[in-house]
Amino acid sequence: MLEADVAVLGAGAAGLSLAHRLSEARSGAPSVLLVDAPPGPLRPPPRTWCYWEEGPGRFDAAVRAEWSRLRVRPPASTPIEQDISPLRYKMIRSDDFEALVARDLARGGNVRRLEATVESVEEVPGAARVRMTGSDGRAELLAARWVFDSRPLGSLPAARTTVLQHFRGWIVRTAGAAFDPATVELMDFRTPQPAEGLSFGYVLPTAVNEALVEYTEFSPRVLSEAGYRLALRHYTRDVLLLPDFEIVAEEGGVIPMTDAPFARRVGTSVFRIGAAGGATRPSTGYTFAGLQRQTRAVASALRRGRHPEPPPAHSARSRAMDAVLLRALDSGRVDGPALFSRLFARVPMAQVLRFLDGRTSLRDDLAVGLHTPIGPMLRTVAELGRLPRRPAR
C-alpha cells in the first residue's frame, strides 16, 4: 500500500497548483502524492488559461504573453479600448505551466507523482483510501490523511440557472502583420448572435502575425464540430478580415456557468478543489484565479497544522450577483452584447476586472450594478427566490 500525508487527485491547474505550493514547505513538510491520469481520454489536451493580477506573479515564468490594453467591440458602434494598468492580463499555456511545476517539484523531495486512474475514494477512521489502476493495469491502494480531488465532476449539482460557455479556438499564423500584439480583443460582439444566449470573438495576439482566435458562446447547447468550424471561418475571414493563415493548433472546451452550490468538503478527510470545488466564477467562466485562492489557503493551513478545508473561491455577495446576471441572460430579459458593451463603456475596465475577481467593496459593486438595466435586474432578483434548483439539462 502506498502512503502519504496528502493525496492530490488530478494534475490539471488545481492539482498542479496545490502540489507546487506544498513543495515549498521546509521543516515538517507533508509527504504528497500527486495522481495524474495516464495519457488518454481522462487527460485533457493542451489548453490556455488567462487571468489578471497586479505586478509580478507566482507563475510568470510560464506566462506566454501579457497585456495592459483590452478592447471590447459592441455589435455596431465604436470599440471600447482602455489601459488596465496596474493590472496585467496574462496568458498561460497548460504545457508551459506543467513544465514549470514539474521543474520546481523536482527540486523538492516531498512530492511524488504517479500515473494512475482513480477508481474510488473511501473514508476510513482518520484518513481516506484511494483505489487506483496503474498505467500497467495493476491495482494500487493509497492511504492518505487528506485527499484533495480536482477531477471533473460526473454531473453538475442542481441549480436555478446553468448556462454553458463553450468555445473553439485556433492558434493562427499569418504571412504578414495582421494583429496588434499590445491589445487583447476581450469580447468582440460582431459575431452573428444565436437564437438563445450570446456569442463573441476573443483574440489573444502573441505577435504581429500570430494569435489565439476563439469563437465563444454562452448558450444552453454546444455546437457540432462543423458548427464551430463554420463560426471560426466566418470570424477570421469575414470579421477580422485575416489574410491567408496557417492553423498551428486548435483547442476548445465547455465551462458550466451555474449558480449551483459546489460542495468543497465531501468527507472527513476528502475535499474538492478547482472547478469541482466551485473555483469557476459563475458569471465569466474564469477559474485560474479562484483556484489559486483555494490552493494558497489549503497549503497555508497544512503548513500550520490546521484543518485544510478549502475556502469558497468567491464571496457570497459575488455568487449572489452572478446568480442574478446568469438568470437575466438565460431568460432573455437582458440583451447580452448590449449589457457587456454598456458595462465596459461606462465603468473603467480595471474596475470591472477587479469586480469580476471579487476584489471590490459593496459600494464598488453597487456602482457597477447601477450601469446594468435596473428594471430587468430587479425583476430577476424577485424571481430568483421562487425558483427551484433543478439538475442541469
Image (cartoon, helix red, strand yellow):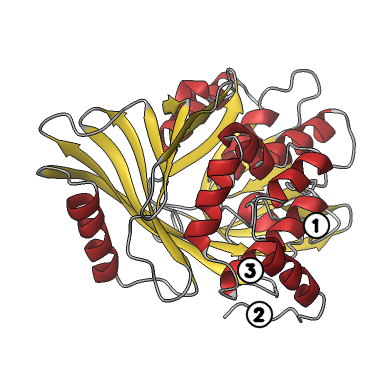
Q: Residue shown at 50%/50% (left/top)? A: 341
Q: Which mark is residue 91?
A: none
Residue that appears at 80% across and 30% down: 300
Mark 1 or mark 3, whichever is nearer to me: 3
| Residue linked to disc 2 | 391
> Residue 15 appears at what percent x and percent y?
60, 43
**Distance Cα–Cα, label 1 vs label 3:** 30 Å
Quadrant assignment, res 136:
bottom left
Q: Earlier in the sequence, mark 2 or mark 1?
A: 1
Q: From what the image shows, is residue 260 above or below residue 283?
A: below
Left or right relative to 15: residue 184: left
| Disc nearer the start of the sequence (1/3) | 1
Helix, strand or loop at disc 2? loop
**Amino acid at the residue labelled 3:** Ala
Q: CA distance from mark 3 to mark 2?
A: 19 Å
**What is the quadrant of residue 176 in the picture?**
top left
Marks 2 and 1, how far apart at CA: 20 Å
